[in-house]
């Protein structure tokens, strides 16, 4: 069901952007969270976003998920149409940072939450989700409750819920941020595997540079607040990517460029934070 | 870790019950001993054995009274819970009159129901209606406040997640806010059980055709203090049963805590 045949353009088709942001600003009172943010995401592309903490990554996601409206004047285009952020509610598949599983629902019922909201009969939705359990490493756990699962499994249930909300664009906000390093590495490989099979467009926030390079076709480095795009880095590493790719010269070279850019921005936001502290 | 939580779920209630029973027996034993050793007159404090004996002897009348009071309390309780939950849900959906509404409700409820009891008797008569109204009134407030608190406890981010799925207010209420509120709603309902019995009895004492409160009032008039205590014992017994039934339902329903 999730399988979608698409010509194997690994890096997506830049001629056909699914999402475009130009001159997008967002201010909260006197605080500018995003300033002149511009980016475009091609159909089928895996774009990762890194940046110093508090750089407005989550604001960006909230806008693309339709939860928050940007300041007027910016351009937001989705599927080649100009849209308001609120038009994107229900059209983009969004996975927040925390798994936010409902403790009163079993694994299977958590996974079908979006389908239920869409009005799919529960029986049908469950049948569909049951078929996906093995792929998400959750076979035999359909009737477990979230408190009975490990962190990695909870995250996979949340991902499954996001996948079952079948939208072309998926937003993943640091989905592996809370996991330990080993689980995290496994989840990254697993996610690539699932993505390779299902080929959706993914916009993925992380603060881990290795993760950003390992997963993405393209990495966007954000500036310190107000967030804009500092650097856009193509990742021309072959797919499927094996775990030891992280030690290859090409990977290291990309990492060096990204780290330099992030370092500069982190220093800025660090200095700004210090300045604020002294000013008080 | 996981096994422990499951184990404590099954062990803790029985241990609590054990302690409760032991504590209760010690209290009754001390009571019995005190009345006998100090030779207290029955109008001060009758011995437990005498009270139990009275309960057995007058079981038919007491059972009828208990049924009368229990019926009033239960009817008022159900109406009160419905109103409390219903109004809280309405205010969650349409929040603008909320602040005013909560202040007025709090102001009205800062006076004990007994204060309104004469009015309730005047409006609803001496029959069961006035007791049901008083119970419903008090219960609805407690359940209303706890439901409101429970509905407020919802995680903003979970609401955003539901919105991103295209969910409307009703879907968010039904699939997220009400389940989130359930533990607090249930706690409010559990606390209200005892309150509903107390209020039914108190209003009965001010005027009624039957019930435990009426029995107590009559017995006081006839200086029959054993009867007063017998009615009190029966009242606490039905309170305990009511409380624990709702507690059990809560434990089954809010299984994820």
Image (cartoon, coloured by chain):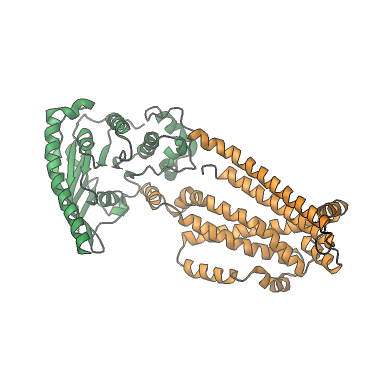
Chain colours: A green, B orange
Residue positioned 31% across, 45% down in the render = A92
Q: Position of residue A6 (x, y in %)?
A: 25, 31
Q: Is residue A196 left or right of residue B128?
A: left
- State left or right for residue A56 relative to residue A165: left
Vertical comparison of A199 with A97: above or below: above
Q: Is B173 in front, or is A261? A: A261
Task: Evaluate whether residue A194 shows in this view.
Answer: no
Residue A26, percent from left and from top: 23, 57
Does the rendering let one see residue B4?
Answer: yes
Numbered-mark total: 0
Q: Residue furthest right?
A: B57
The residue lying toward the viewer, choosing from A191 and B38, is B38
| Residue A93 placement (x, y as % from top left) | 33, 43
Q: Nearer the viewer, residue B93 or B33?
A: B33
List x then y, in percent, for residue B177: 47, 52
Q: Quadrant of residue B230?
A: bottom right
**Towards the viewer: A116 or A194:** A194
């Amino acid at each position: 069901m999730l399988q979608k045949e698409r010509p194997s353009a690994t890096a997506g088709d830049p001629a056909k952007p699914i999402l475009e942001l130009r001159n997008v600003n967002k201010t909260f009172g006197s605080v500018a969270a995003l300033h002149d943010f511009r980016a475009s995401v091609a159909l089928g592309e895996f774009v990762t976003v890194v940046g110093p903490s508090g750089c407005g990554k989550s604001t960006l996601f909230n806008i693309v998920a339709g939860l928050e409206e940007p300041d007027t004047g910016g351009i937001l285009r989705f599927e080649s149409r100009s849209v308001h952020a609120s038009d994107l509610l229900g059209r983009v598949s969004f996975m927040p940072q925390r798994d936010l599983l409902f403790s009163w629902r079993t694994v299977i019922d958590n996974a079908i939450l979006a389908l239920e909201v869409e009005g799919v009969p529960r029986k049908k939705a469950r049948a569909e989700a049951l078929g996906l359990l093995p792929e998400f490493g959750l076979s035999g756990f359909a009737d477990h409750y979230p408190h009975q699962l490990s962190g990695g499994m909870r995250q996979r249930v949340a991902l499954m819920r996001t996948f079952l909300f079948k939208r072309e664009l998926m937003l993943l906000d640091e989905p592996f941020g809370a996991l330990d390093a080993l689980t995290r590495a496994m989840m990254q490989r697993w996610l690539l595997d699932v993505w390779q099979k299902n080929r959706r467009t993914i916009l993925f926030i992380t603060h881990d540079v290795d993760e950003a390079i390992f997963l993405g076709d393209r990495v966007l480095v954000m500036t310190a607040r107000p967030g804009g795009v500092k650097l856009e880095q193509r990742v021309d590493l072959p797919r499927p990517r094996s775990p030891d790719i992280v030690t290859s010269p090409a990977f290291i070279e990309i990492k060096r460029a990204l780290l330099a850019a992030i370092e500069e921005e982190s220093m800025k936001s660090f200095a700004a934070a210090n300045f604020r502290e002294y000013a008080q | 870790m996981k096994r422990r939580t499951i184990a404590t779920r099954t062990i803790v209630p029985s241990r609590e019950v054990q302690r409760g029973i032991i504590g209760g027996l010690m209290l009754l034993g001390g009571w019995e001993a005190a009345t006998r050793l100090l030779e207290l007159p029955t109008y001060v404090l009758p011995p437990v054995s005498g009270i139990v004996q009275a309960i057995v002897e007058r079981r038919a009348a007491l059972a009828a009274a208990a049924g009368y009071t229990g019926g009033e309390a239960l009817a008022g309780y159900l109406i009160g819970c419905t109103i409390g939950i219903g109004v809280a849900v309405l205010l969650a959906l349409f929040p603008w009159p909320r602040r005013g509404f909560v202040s007025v409700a709090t102001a009205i409820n800062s006076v004990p129901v007994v204060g309104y009891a004469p009015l309730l008797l005047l409006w609803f008569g001496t029959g069961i209606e006035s007791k049901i109204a008083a119970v419903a009134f008090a219960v609805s407030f407690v359940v209303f406040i706890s439901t409101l608190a429970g509905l407020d406890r919802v995680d903003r981010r979970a609401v955003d997640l539901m919105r991103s799925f295209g969910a409307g207010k009703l879907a968010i209420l039904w699939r997220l806010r009400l389940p989130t509120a359930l533990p607090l709603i249930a706690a409010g309902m559990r606390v209200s059980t005892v309150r509903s019995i107390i209020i039914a009895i108190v209003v009965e004492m001010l005027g009624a055709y039957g019930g435990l409160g009426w029995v107590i009032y009559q017995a006081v008039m006839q200086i029959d203090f054993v009867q007063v205590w017998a009615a009190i014992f029966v009242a606490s017994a039905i309170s305990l049963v009511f409380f624990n039934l709702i507690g059990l339902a809560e434990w089954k329903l809010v299984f994820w805590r």
